[in-house]
Image (cartoon, coloured by chain):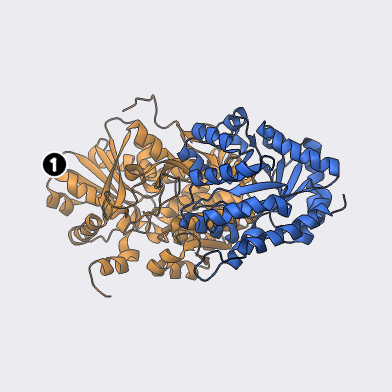
């Protein structure tokens, strides 16, 4: 089964059903490996169409407080890149179809070794990569090797990516395009519906790939609004905050945490899937 | 040592020094960085810009800074003839102001109306706040909560100068986190804000820009040594945090093979412990803050905390050009511990009547180790990058004294 296949098949199926995708983000190992595996396993049934798994990093420069804290919780609990790939393998053993995308920063991958990482990621069942600090100017580092290994490289396009630059950003992008709807870090400000709509229209002039929109989508209502214009809504910080708020005094996951997070995902999924397009 | 036709050829068009450097930033920042690069290329070739830079260097910073023969120290150590390149005499008391003058002129040229910066020890923060006061631009300085606690005088200075000092509470609450937070600010304020980076690190073109503005240190040293001794120095010694004062001192001498160059990293409690900030001696290549360089990191690629008695040196990385020069063997990188730096601080104060900052005290500690074995006609220059007034509380604490 080709990995490009899972992402493409997923978007094709959604298109046939006339609905947008919900893409959910959680950080691997937040707050511990067992809980994040339980969350991952529950996400597809709760309505997540694609799953982004954050690779924890000490210095997540593009992330707001919620995802920074999630990274630190995961690292404190001992999560590593090897551990993240192990989570993917365990998830994949029970789910052959849901696309999985690893999202994070380059240094842990660089230290792991790019060639070894791509082999292990592919074997584990990873479909795509989003690496925030690798712009097209550094494509030879990971983007091109990933494409050669059959793993999608999903690029972020932003409000500062003008029409002149957009073709360079899209050139080696595969799977889908991730539009960062604000100039800012994750989980902070929110863009207006009009701004998002204009941006998606602009992107569609340059690419036939599905367009996902993320950053600042905090509620089912916001997710539904995005789903009316984009092919997918990405929700990260809001889900991660649910995890943080549900922890006990010692920072551990109490009974019922997974279910309450998944309940929020169901609300998001209902909103996205019910959006008029 | 690898022989190149020139060691002054970096970076290439993509901002690389060999495998180091580059532009590892989020897409949101990429267009901004390309703009800075374009604006700098134009400014560099503009005689008006250069004239303005030189004017402020002369009349505001007080350049040239003296190249001073440290006679008593030379006698005390009984070997090499030691000179101090006295950057501590600059306005604001350190070399940081050279770069800040250059970049604030660039920011104005670009029409930016708000300045942000990161600071560790506070020297770059003070220098940035100073030029922002001079040019009437609002500025926000990011500083780790831990550093704010140990560098109170500089925090107060920045506030007196009109800067907003924002405590950084994320991560380890020191310089690297201040840099993360400044980058997050820049991503959020793309249209009006200029990020005034304080050292030869960060994404291209910053390592090149900061080096070029600091190269005045080495250019003056060259002329002054020719005037004083009629020949080039034999060795140049400078401390390395991010490495801007060292890069500025070394750069004009990179293609003079007779001049040996030594960078001194902070060995903290010792290189065999986890409490040091020697990214080249104890780290490995990695990617952080927009560039590939030597970093203190664990086997999983997670960034480790640097430790040094000097807040200006405990950055877990180093400028990419240093990493390149290290691999090529053109610059030798040594280290000095907290204890050695303290001894050097005391010796310099007593023999020369100069309180050095704890940062250059590390370079001086190397000189104390090395000078005695060298002949009397060996001309050695210490990059005395800053003055020690800011450090008296730290030094008192380390000596078990209460002020």
What hue does chain B carry in this figure?
A: orange
Say left or right for B280 vs B22: left
Single out the residue that lies furthest toward the front. A94
Is the residue marked by circle 1 packed among few (<14), some (14-19), or many (20+) residues within 10 Å? few
Q: Residue at x 56, y 62 (%)?
A: B139
Chain identifier for the blue-coloured part of the image: A
Residue B399 x, y percent position in the rendering: 22, 67
Secondary structure, mark 1, is helix
**Image mark count:** 1
Mark 1 belongs to chain: B
Say left or right for B85 vs A255: left
Location of mark 1 (residue): B373
Asked whether residue B208 is in view, the answer is yes
Residue B41 x, y percent position in the rendering: 56, 38
Residue B324 x, y percent position in the rendering: 40, 35
Depth order, front residue of A235/A260:
A260
Residue B373 x, y percent position in the rendering: 13, 41
Image quarter (top left, top right, bottom left or bottom right) of the C terminus of chain B: bottom left
Please determine whether, in this image, residue A125 is positioned above or below residue B391: above
Image quarter (top left, top right, bottom left or bottom right) of the N terminus of chain B: top left
Single out the residue that lies furthest toward the right. A276
Depth order, front residue of B20/B303:
B303
**Picture quadrant of residue B358:** bottom left
Single out the residue that lies furthest toward the bottom. B403
Asked whether residue A187 is in view, the answer is no
Say left or right for B318 vs B339: right
Q: Residue at x 17, y 53 (%)?
A: B73
């Amino acid at each position: 089964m080709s990995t490009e296949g899972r992402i493409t098949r997923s978007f094709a199926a959604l298109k046939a059903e006339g609905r947008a995708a919900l893409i959910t983000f959680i950080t691997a190992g937040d707050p511990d490996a067992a809980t994040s595996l339980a969350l991952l396993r529950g996400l597809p049934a709760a309505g997540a169409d694609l799953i982004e798994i954050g690779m924890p990093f000490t210095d997540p420069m593009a992330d707001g407080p919620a995802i920074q804290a999630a990274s630190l919780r995961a690292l404190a609990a001992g999560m590593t890149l090897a551990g993240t790939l192990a989570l993917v393998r365990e998830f994949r053993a029970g789910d052959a179809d849901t696309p999985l995308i690893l999202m994070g920063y380059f240094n842990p991958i660089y230290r792991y070794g790019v060639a070894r990482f791509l082999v292990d990621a592919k074997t584990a069942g990873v479909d795509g990569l989003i690496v925030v600090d690798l712009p097209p100017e550094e494509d030879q580092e990971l983007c091109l090797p990933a494409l050669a290994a059959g793993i999608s490289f999903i690029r972020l396009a932003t409000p500062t990516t003008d029409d002149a630059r957009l073709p360079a950003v899209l050139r080696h992008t595969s799977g889908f395009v991730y539009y960062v709807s604000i100039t800012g870090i994750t989980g902070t400000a929110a863009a207006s519906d009009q701004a998002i709509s204009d941006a998606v229209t602009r992107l569609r002039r340059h690419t036939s790939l599905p367009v996902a929109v993320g950053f600042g989508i905090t509620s089912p209502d916001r997710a539904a609004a995005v789903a009316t214009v984009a092919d997918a809504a990405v929700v990260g910080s809001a889900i991660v905050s649910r995890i943080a708020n549900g922890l006990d005094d010692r920072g551990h996951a109490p009974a019922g945490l997974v279910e309450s997070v998944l309940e929020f995902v169901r609300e998001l999924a209902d909103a996205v899937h019910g959006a008029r397009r | 040592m690898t022989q190149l036709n020139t060691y002054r050829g970096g970076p290439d068009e993509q901002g690389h020094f060999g495998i180091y450097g580059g532009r590892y930033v989020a897409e949101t920042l990429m267009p901004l960085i390309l703009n800075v690069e374009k604006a700098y290329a134009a400014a560099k070739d503009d005689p008006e810009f250069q004239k303005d830079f030189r004017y402020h260097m002369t009349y505001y910073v007080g350049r040239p800074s003296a190249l001073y023969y440290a006679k008593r120290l030379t006698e005390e150590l009984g070997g090499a003839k030691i000179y101090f390149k006295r950057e501590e005499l600059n306005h604001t008391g350190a070399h940081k102001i050279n770069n800040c003058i250059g970049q604030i002129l660039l920011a104005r040229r670009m029409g930016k109306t708000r300045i942000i910066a990161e600071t560790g020890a506070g020297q770059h923060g003070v220098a940035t706040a100073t030029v922002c006061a001079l040019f009437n631009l609002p500025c926000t300085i990011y500083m780790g909560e831990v550093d704010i606690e140990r560098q109170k005088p500089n925090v107060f200075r920045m506030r007196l100068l009109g800067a907003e000092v924002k405590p950084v509470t994320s991560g380890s609450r020191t310089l690297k986190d201040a840099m993360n937070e400044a980058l997050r600010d820049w991503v959020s304020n793309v249209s009006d804000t200029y990020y005034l980076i304080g050292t030869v690190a960060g994404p291209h073109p910053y390592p090149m820009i900061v080096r070029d503005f600091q190269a005045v240190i080495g250019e003056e040293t060259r002329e002054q040594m020719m005037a004083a001794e009629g020949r080039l120095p034999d060795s140049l010694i400078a401390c390395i945090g991010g490495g801007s004062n060292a890069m500025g001192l070394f750069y004009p001498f990179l293609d003079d093979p007779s001049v040996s160059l030594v960078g001194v990293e902070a060995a903290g409690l010792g290189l065999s412990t986890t409490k040091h900030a020697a990214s080249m001696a104890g780290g490995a290549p990695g990617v952080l803050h927009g560039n590939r360089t030597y970093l203190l990191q664990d086997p999983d690629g997670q960034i480790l905390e640097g430790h040094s008695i000097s807040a200006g040196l405990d950055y877990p990385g180093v400028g990419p050009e240093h990493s390149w020069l290290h691999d090529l063997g053109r610059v030798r990188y040594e280290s000095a511990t907290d204890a050695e730096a303290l001894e050097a601080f005391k010796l310099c104060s007593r023999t020369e009547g100069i309180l050095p900052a704890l940062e250059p005290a590390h370079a001086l500690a190397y000189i104390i180790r090395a000078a005695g074995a060298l002949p009397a006609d060996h001309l050695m220059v210490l990059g005395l990058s800053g003055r020690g007034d800011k450090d008296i509380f730290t030094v008192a604490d380390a000596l078990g004294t209460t002020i």
